[in-house]
Image (cartoon, grey):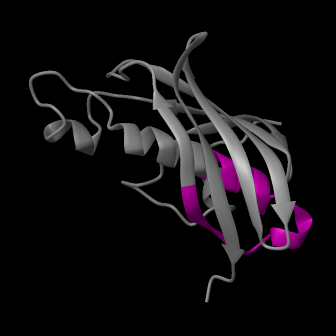
Amino acid sequence: MDFGVQDIKNIIPHRYPFLLIDRVSYIEPGKKVVAYKNVTSNEYFFQGHFPEMPVMPGVLIIEALAQAGAVAILSQEEFKGKIAFFGAINKAKFRRNVVPGDTLKLEVEIIKIKGSAGIGKGTAYIGEKKAAEGELMFMIGDKN
């Protein structure tokens, strides 16, 4: 199953300039997702991080992983129409710079859900090399 930006926007509430995933190539609702972010030189954050040597901020890589994880969770029947919030970030590691021209492959596996809270393990890759990883704790809530 391949989701484009419009499909993603039907699941999560993020919009430009903060929607950080472009495509979902695999989803197992409530369990696993594989998504992609094409990093271009036109990204708003490169204006200040860093103009002389553009590098995607690590926190935005983690946010991209969280958005991918939210697609997996909010595609699960019982959570459709809800919103996912960050609870915590644990064991975050940044292994390489992400620069214009890179395509981030974002893999998130949901490792625990209890009630409306859970934990996902996310890994971002450039090609086959890890760029970042971490445990993402989340809570599911109503949109209003």
Q: Is residue 96 left or right of residue 32?
A: left
Which residue appears at 46% of the width and 60% of the height? 15
- The x, y position of residue 8, in whole percent, is 64, 52
Visible residue check, residue 21: no
Q: Residue at x 69, y 40 (%)?
A: 121
Left-right relation of 51 to 131: left
- Residue located farthest toward the top when viewing the structure as drawn: 128
* Residue toward you, 110 or 24: 110
Residue at position x 29%, y 38% from top? 43
Q: Quadrant of the C terminus?
A: bottom right
Q: Residue 100 vs residue 63: left or right?
A: left
| Quarter of the picture holding the N terminus | top right
What residue sits 37% from the left and 18% below the top?
Answer: 101
Q: Which quarter of the picture shows residue 11? A: bottom right
Position in image of residue 66 (x %, y %):
58, 50
Q: Is residue 5 above or below residue 84?
A: above
Query: Can residue 102 be seen at all in this image of the molecule?
Result: yes
Q: Is residue 97 placed above or below 28 in the rendered structure? A: above
- Please state the total of marks drawn on the protein image: 0
Q: Position of residue 94 (x, y in %)?
A: 44, 28
Residue furthest bottom in the image: 144
Q: Nearer the viewer, residue 112 or 128?
A: 112
The image quarter in which residue 46 lies: top left
Q: Residue furthest left?
A: 52
The answer to if 85 sits in the magenta stretch is yes
5 falls in the magenta region: no
Where, by quadrant of the figure, is residue 47 drawn?
A: top left
- Asked if residue 73 lies left or right of residue 16, the reply is right
User: Over which residues does the magenta segment extend?
Assistant: 67-88
